[in-house]
Image: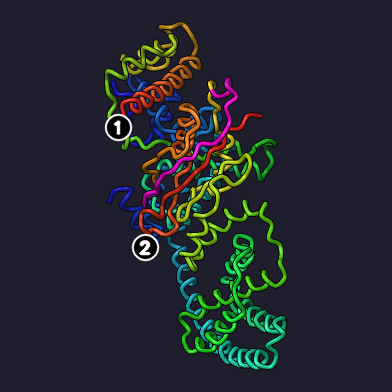
Amino acid sequence: MTENEKLEKYARTGDLELLGQVYADYMHLVFGVCLKYFKNKEDAQDGVIQVFEKLVVDLKKHSVTNFKSWLYVTSRNFCLMELRKKNKIQNTSLENMEYTLPVHHEQEEPVDEEGLDECIEKLPENQRKCIRLFYLKELCYKEITEILDTNLNQVKSAIQNGKRNLKLCLERKREHIQ
Amino acid sequence: MNIFNNDIDHLSIEEIRAYLDNQMSNKEMHDFERHLLDCELCNDAFEGYQASGISFENETREHLRSIVTSHSKTKKYPNMAIAASVVILLCASIVFLFSYFEKDSTKVSMAEKEKEESITAPLELEDSVESIKNEVIEEEPEKTQKKHKVSKVLPRTEPKIVIPQKVTKEELSDETALLDNSDSFLEETVNEEIVSDDKKNVVSFSDSQPEKLTGETERFEITSAKSRIKKETFAQRSLAAPLSMKKSESSLLAQNALPVVGIDSYKLYLKDSLRYPESAKRNQLTGQVVLRFEVKEEGEINDLTVEKGLSTECDLEAKRLVLEGSKWVLIDKNLPAEKNVVNLTVEFTLK
């Protein structure tokens, strides 16, 4: 059974063993997300269990096509809620809550290569260089920092921003054609 | 060059460990980094491990695994308990219903008597209706909530409806007839209540405040969709409601769909995440963009169109908000597609 089949069957039958099986593969990731917010092992362990309890309820009510995105939003929101409850962070307002679900990669439209090149050309120099080295030459961050003589965070943010800009640029193009 | 595709499903703990311990080749590191760019779950998890320096030990893993799997065994019994309590509740409600009908038939016949005796005293008649209503409230707490909302809202939305006294009488006598017919009983009770409330409205000209119409209408739509009572009437009314309801707040009109995060959170999201287009800011452009889209069965947004635009940039921004925003969920999946259309107004206001 694939993951989605298991989840679908769980929604129908409520068989927690299936959900447990699916969840087991992701526990280390939920643990990591909890670590990011709680910064200690005990709370993170607790979080893994509590997120599971949430899934037990939620996945019966909603049919989920992209489990991973769902799990991410659920874990993150759980952590933020906990932090707010404990008042560890004074200003955890609703602004930090995640409303968006990540784009479903499998539904992505095929990228037209020419348009992509054009969009890369339009990027600021720094982003353009990093994007090319990363996606075209398939180098890792460390190698790029050496080539460009800069630091890791700058490379990382240049690639992140570049990628976002490319996406926006391609979307505009697509809408233009339509 | 493939920038937006992501082949890896998710990162294993071993990979995360290897990356943090610098035990990967450059190519492996590239693949790892590339996945983090595409996957927020893995990215946040990785950041958690990186920042805290805490690792996911085998011990922890086994501990959690045992809890999650034992969970699945112990939970089977609570399920049985739920099933048992449902059966008990069912029995109890049957007993309740029987005793209720007996009590009620006497009540109604009393009410009818009163009606015959005092045709010129509508207030008393209203009282008796009231007492029947109270009876219902006691018996069915869950239903009452919905009804409360309905009755609270209805007089405000349509304060001008005048229902002649006769109708009330008919309803009342209908009620006696209905006592044999338990299926349609509840629905009819609601009818009767709406009528009685409207009547009250006419008699006492109670609070029909047009300014307050706005907020109420929204709540009312959700209630109507959820309670599924008299769906058609509700639908017509909600269509008649104005598109933009509050002065400077985005609004949405939907009969059968809700954002997964809830209406309030969604509005907050629209407000907080709006990036005011530079050109509009420069030109001091304010106003509304009305979008229209259909929610598909899986909650995806389909057919997003601009009903009323403001400027190209603003339209795009409004569309972006909706597309990047929460998923939606259909309240009733069996309704025809045209019911799943959402009208959403995004406000562009400058401070």
Rounded to the nearest angstrom, the CA distance separating label 2 from label 1 is 35 Å
- The answer to if A102 sits in the magenta stretch is no
Report the mark closest to the observer, 2 or 1.
Answer: 1
Residue closer to the observer: B263 or B25:
B263
Disc 1 crowd rating (10 Å Cα; few below 14, some 14-19, many 20+) is few
Residue wearing tag 1: A109
> Label for residue A13?
2
Q: In this view, does B26 lie to the left or right of B135?
A: left
Q: Which amino acid does label 1 sit on?
A: Glu
Q: Which of B325 and A137 is in front in this view?
A: B325
Q: In this view, does B283 lie to the left or right of B182?
A: right
- Answer yes or no: do the residues labelled 2 and 1 have beta carbons within 8 Å? no
Q: Which of marks 2 and 1 is nearer the N terminus?
A: 2
Q: Position of residue A49 (x, y in %)?
A: 51, 49
Q: Is B12 situated above or below B294?
A: above
Tell me where residue B26 appears, x and y as whole percent.
35, 17
Q: Where is residue A136 in the image (x, y as percent from the top left)?
A: 31, 15
The image quadrant that residue B209 belongs to is bottom right
